[in-house]
Amino acid sequence: MSVNIHIPTPLRRFTSEQGEVEVEGATVGEALKDLTQQFPALQPHLYTEAGALRSFVNVFLNDEDVRYLQKEGTKIASGDTLSIIPSIAGGAVSLLETERELDDLPDLSPAEIRHYSRHLILPEIGTVGQRKLKAAKVLMIGTGGLGSPLGLYLAAAGIGTLGLVDFDVVDESNLHRQVLFGRTSVGKPKVMAAADRLRDVNPHIKIIPHETRLDSSNALELFKDYDLIVDGTDNFPTRYLVNDACVLLGKPNVYGSIFRFEGQVSVFWGAKGPCYRCLFPEPPPPGLVPSCAEGGVLGVLPGIIGSLQANEVIKLVAGAGEPLIGRLVMFDALKLRFRELNLRKNPDCPICSDHPTQHELIDYEQFCGIHPEEERVEQAFEISAPELKSWLEEGRPVTVLDVRNPPEWEISRIEGAMLIPLSELQDRLGELDPADTIVAHCHHGMRSARAVNLLRQMGFARAINLAGGIDAWSQMVDPTIPRY
Amino acid sequence: MSRLSILPDHLRTIHQHAEASYPEECCGFLIGRASGETTAVERVLPAGNQREDSRHNRYLIHPETVLAAHKEARGLGLDVIGYYHSHPDHPSRPSDFDREHAWPGLSYLIVSVQGGRVADERSWRLTDERDRFDEERIDQRLEKEAV
């Protein structure tokens, strides 16, 4: 079968200036193969090194795009005409390569080439992408649940400079999800334990621990030396702080958050798309969304969400694929379902719009309505665990009210206590007697403080709070009660 | 060194397109004549960015639109001799993505738009070996000057 192929002008230099070439073949693929055999110099412009037709090269059979026929397997008949038409694609893809010339990228040592060989053979990363990873400076906020997979994968992948920010120490209750740490890390500062572990994962990179609590006074100074910030925080004030500092400095913020069985991931970058504030202009009222410590979290969930964040970091740095800018991915672990929302930039966003009303960092505790004093009760309305013990031993008539959630009740309880979760308290006041002395308790004393304030407002004048919650009870009174 | 000869009016059209599209990328066709090392732009044809996603750092013109531009060029006795596109908040240097998606023999004019304003433009040609883009000179010619 002989057909004519129409050659576009820029490629005619490879076909001895012929605009039309006669080729043999029964299918489009065979015809193109014959063409590149006649003119081998055309091959690299039509096909990738792996032998696939380049994605921007389109082949039309007469007037039909063969993509909508049988692609390269499309049968051809004598007299047909094939046209090669480029779709035009391009872009400033290496997002972080702002002022970095290729020649300025650091070289890879033979040891690094061995370490990264499985990356180097991926065309989307390759040597250039790996050198970009080496040149990149990434700051991780938090080295906990999300920070664990993030740290492990970013270090392993060869992010050249990895900063870690955390002020916490490793606790036993961290180990079910914070896989950076093991038993020997308990009690150590997280950034130090994390740095030790990550240096073992990859000795070729620089780890910078910042053992500090991130706040409005240090965020800009900390962020300014990094190309990209990864948000692995567990609370709203820090999340808004990270967002705002990134917008003010024009840096991308790879966001992830987890709650019980659900997670979210996005890339917020005010200069390129929406920011966190475009999505959530206002924080939820304090107490509505419990923290992991109050609400619990599935241990593997941060592993999934943190890994997705690491994936986005590596893509942004290497300039591979489609970054998650303007899209929010939501994951439900129980249903095993991903959902995706398109996000738009809020034209009136107070921080990332054309006419911002906020030009500096603010007090984020106040912005999120968190006033520590509100969550406490007056000292006169508080009782210590040993005091409660002696009251009970004296046989004083006391109602011990547990305001935790049922799963916590299953773990441990104070003998004789009654359970009314804080969220149900308002509706179940009828079960309590306003004349009784009511000692409310929770895990650490915060939720029960809210309960006591509520009860006193509702006329339960003898409601008091167990300071330190059941945790204090376990430590000071009854060590047989498991701590969690 | 090859040379791209272009009218100030053409550059103005391209700049306007780039600034109006910011922070997304814009793209369009350069239509004209090529002779030896010089390509002369006779007409600029803005195209809509037909990508649905990542429009801030990617552009795409569908083959049907390219076909139409080629027809328009042929109708004028000219050729599509290159493309222009913008890099919002990035230098006017081709990216690796650009290199993977280009052909030699065409001029790729890239306009850098910084914070909504055009900062500069540079024109590039892919080498036959596809290993790099070589910069070409941009000459602004006066209306009546012969090419």
Image: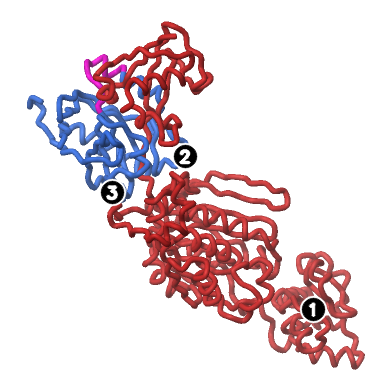
Chain colours: A red, B blue
Q: Is the residue marked by circle 3 packed among few (<14), some (14-19), or many (20+) residues within 10 Å?
A: many
What is the spatial separation of the Cα atoms under label 3 and label 2, in whole angstroms? 21 Å
Q: Earlier in the sequence, mark 3 or mark 2?
A: 2
Q: Quadrant of the C terminus of chain A?
A: bottom right
Snapshot quadrant of residue A289: bottom right
Residues at marks 2 and 1 on the same chain: no
Nearer the observer: mark 3 or 2; the answer is: 3
Say if mark 3 contacts mark 2, CB within 8 Å.
Answer: no
Say if mark 3 contacts mark 1, CB within 8 Å.
Answer: no
Residue in the foreground of this view, choosing between A111 and A426:
A111
In this image, A254 relative to A47: left or right? right
What is the spatial separation of the Cα atoms under label 3 and label 1, in whole angstroms? 60 Å
In this image, A25 relative to A339: left or right? left
- Residue A231 lies within the magenta run: no
Q: Position of residue A371 (x, y in %)?
A: 59, 75
Q: Chain of mark 1?
A: A
Going by the numbered disc 3, the residue's amino acid type is Pro
How many dots with numbers? 3
Q: Is residue A347 visible?
A: no
Kind of element beneath mark 3: loop
Snapshot quadrant of residue B36: top left
Q: Is the residue marked by circle 1 packed among few (<14), some (14-19), or many (20+) residues within 10 Å?
A: few
Q: Is residue A459 visible?
A: yes
Report which residue position mark 1 lands on. Answer: A482
Residue at left offset 67%, top offset 46%: A337
- Which residue is most to the right? A395
What is the spatial separation of the Cα atoms under label 2 and label 1, in whole angstroms? 52 Å
Going by the numbered disc 1, the residue's amino acid type is Pro
In this image, A263 relative to B103: left or right? right
